[in-house]
Image (cartoon, rainbow, N blue to C red):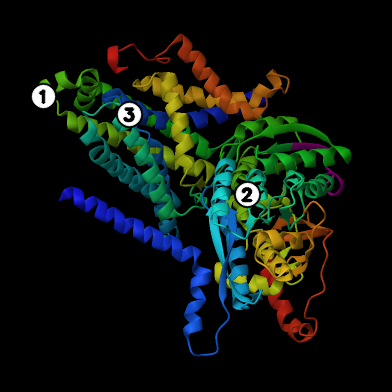
Amino acid sequence: MDTLLQQLINGLTLGAVYALVALGYTMVYGIIGLINFAHGEVVMIGTMVAFTIIVSLAGSGMPPLLILSVGLLIAVVACMVLGWGLERVAYRPLRHAPRLTPLITAIGMSIVLQNVAMIIWGRNYITFPPMIEKQIYEVAGASFTNVQVAIVVLAALVMIGLTYLVQRTRMGMAMRATAQNQHVAQLMGVDIDRVIAMAFIIGSALGALAGCMVGSYYEIAHYQMGFMLGLKAFTAAVLGGIGNMAGAMAGGLLLGIIEALGAGYIGDLTGNFLGSHYQDIFAFMVLIVVLMFRPSGLFGERTGDRA
Amino acid sequence: MKDARIPGVLIVLAASVAMIGCGKKEEPKAAAPAPAAAPAPAPKPEIVVKIGHVAPLTGPIAHLGKDNENGARLAVDDANAKKLEIDGKLVKFELLGEDDQADPKTGTVVAQKLVDAKVAGVVGHLNSGTTIPASAIYNQAGLPQISPSATNPKYTQQGFNTTFRVMANDIQQGSVVGTYAVKDMGAKKVAIIDDRTAYGQGLADEVEKAAKAAGATIVAREFTTDKATDFKAILTKIKAKNPDVIFLGGMDAIGGPMLKQIKELGIKAKFTTGDGGCSPELIKLAAAASEGVICTQAGLPVDKLPNGQKFVEDFTKKYGQIQIYSPYSYDAVMVLIDAMKRANSVDPVKYLPEVGKTSYDGVTGKVEFDEKGDIKNGAITVFEIKDGKLVTLKSEGGTVAAAPAPAAAPAAAPAAAPAAAPEAKK
């Protein structure tokens, strides 16, 4: 029982990070129907920027929590600029090009960003300085740290804030209108260039936040870390129904928990025939099964040719 | 007009490519007439011998790849400084360093690239997973290959006459770790994790065998990948089995974060790992969580390397801290060169038989190969991480070769000994 609880806690932390990254994919997809494969790299750049700021401020005598906040803030701003720049340079000129063109550009940008990061921050693993003293709590035999609590709480707050932004503000309304039909929205006076740029900016800010979470959770960063994280988050977005924000959140949490439970129990369930190396396969199996019965994901709706 | 310009450009390009191509190939011959024309006493004709080196220079274990490459580079520099003559010609060695990204597929691609570049021999690769598939390519080309760090036994068991290694293999290493965990650490229940690479899996299998033979039970056998960062799920499962010792067959890049997560989950078991995790990098990545880790290296500790002091000094001055296997890649290059000298030829066909007959006093000890190409009497050393340093617990096997210059030793010893001691602890 305590093992199950522990696995759920592991999965929840991982899932919260996936959910934040998945939101970045899903917002962009929902509005312009593009899978921004460079998003994982934006997350990585966020981690790296935060790392650089934190390391350079570490000796300045500022309180650790303040350093962490400053690092986080600068990383978020840097990623917002990066997200905006990506859209402006790589995607906007191709907005009316065939679907495949921006997709390939996205993969290209992902490779470019990875290599730029390799040049700037090197090839080695870098240790993310732990700014918060890790406290280990134990409840009913399962242990978790204050960092994990912070990750889950922060992720929840951000998701609530985002839902408010999209559902209750003028900008959100413009976003929803653009997602439904770009041309009609434009006729109604919505500045769709601005709306699309906002989707990238907000998505990248969430990515930077997720990157800092991953950094302080594993205390490690690497120029290739964004690739796998991005792939998993993309899977989570598809699982929940890509283009749907509630779907991305649910999909992220679900994927995290499925992974943890998969690794923890697949061996026992199959009598050690399948070991924990089938952890990823287990997650993707669930994805396939869900897509077989609900082709547009858990929360996805059939939306004509834009889906 | 426009049409005419393109062929013009092409011709220039083609010509320059051809010139570059020729320039490289003809280097040995082209170099000869030039000095001959000089009036001074005709210098010896010079030939360039390329030695290939392959290791992952990008990716999670790029630091280890760079370490190996730097070792080989230092050897090439030292050899060039000696101005060796083979077959009456002055030999200039050149190191062609390639990156295999620790990926078996890329490993075979770069192996072919080296063969096409007409290298005289290869030092590498770093990982067993890349070394084994690449060895077939070198074997076909008849190129001697010496790995400084691929410990999987299969590498030399393929019946090739071109495969060699300069450190002990995983059968020896696995049995030392497995037995040590049970006999010296008193483990009754052992949990084993591997990263599904040829190295990690092979070593973990050997540890499992040895631990079972010594009377322990294997309570969990879990798996991860060489690029993973989250191990909480498998560690939670292991925690439920309550082992005394956890063994990881994998590299330092996953060992570091794993150690931190072990601590966070409140697991009390002692952590052990093989040579892939036995590096200063592990200490850097795991920080305080690395305290008390037991690990092994397939070789003697740096401070016990018979001729190692000078190597340690030179290497540290030039490239910084030694990770694990740079002394071995240094020796691997030197063994190739030594075989060339004895065969009096840089042609792989002629000097390959000499590699097998090697008896060389290297910085890592005496290098002699058995009929398969494994090193004879390879050493295994057990370390413990104490106060953020790798401390030697014990060494098994290994020939401590007589220092080649004992006459110089007495004078140097008093000064060198205190200097070497703190160095070795790093």
Q: What residue lies at 62% left-to-right and 60% top-to-bottom?
A: B120
Q: Is residue A154 above or below residue A300?
A: below
Q: Quadrant of residue A190?
A: top left
**Letter of the chain that mark 1 sits on in the rendering:** A
Element type at mark 1: loop
Residue A110 location (% of width, % of height): 38, 40
Residue B234 location (% of width, % of height): 65, 32
Give me the C-alpha separation between circle 1 and circle 3.
26 Å
Q: Are marks 1 and 3 in contact (CB under 8 Å)?
A: no
Please identify the residue farthest to the bottom as the structure is shown. B40
Is A194 left, or right, of B378 in this rendering? left
**Nearer to us: label 3 or label 2:** 2
Give me the C-alpha separation between circle 3 and circle 2.
40 Å
Element type at mark 2: helix
Q: Quadrant of the C terminus of chain B?
A: bottom right
Please identify the residue farthest to the top as the structure is shown. A293
Disc assigned to residue A161: 3
Q: Which residues are magenta?
A: B182-191
Q: Which residue is mark 1?
A: A189
Give me the C-alpha separation between circle 2 and circle 1.
57 Å
Q: Is residue B157 above or below residue B407?
A: above
Name the amino acid type tagged 1: Gly
Name the amino acid type tagged 3: Gly
Q: Which residue is mark 2?
A: B252
**Letter of the chain that mark 2 sits on in the rendering:** B
Q: Is residue B359 above or below residue A129?
A: below
Q: What residue lies at 75% left-to-right and 55% top-to-bottom?
A: B298
> Quick check: can you spot residue B336?
yes
**Nearer to us: label 2 or label 1:** 2
Mark 3 surroundings within 10 Å by alpha-carbon count, few (fewer than 14), some (14 through 19), many (20 or more): few
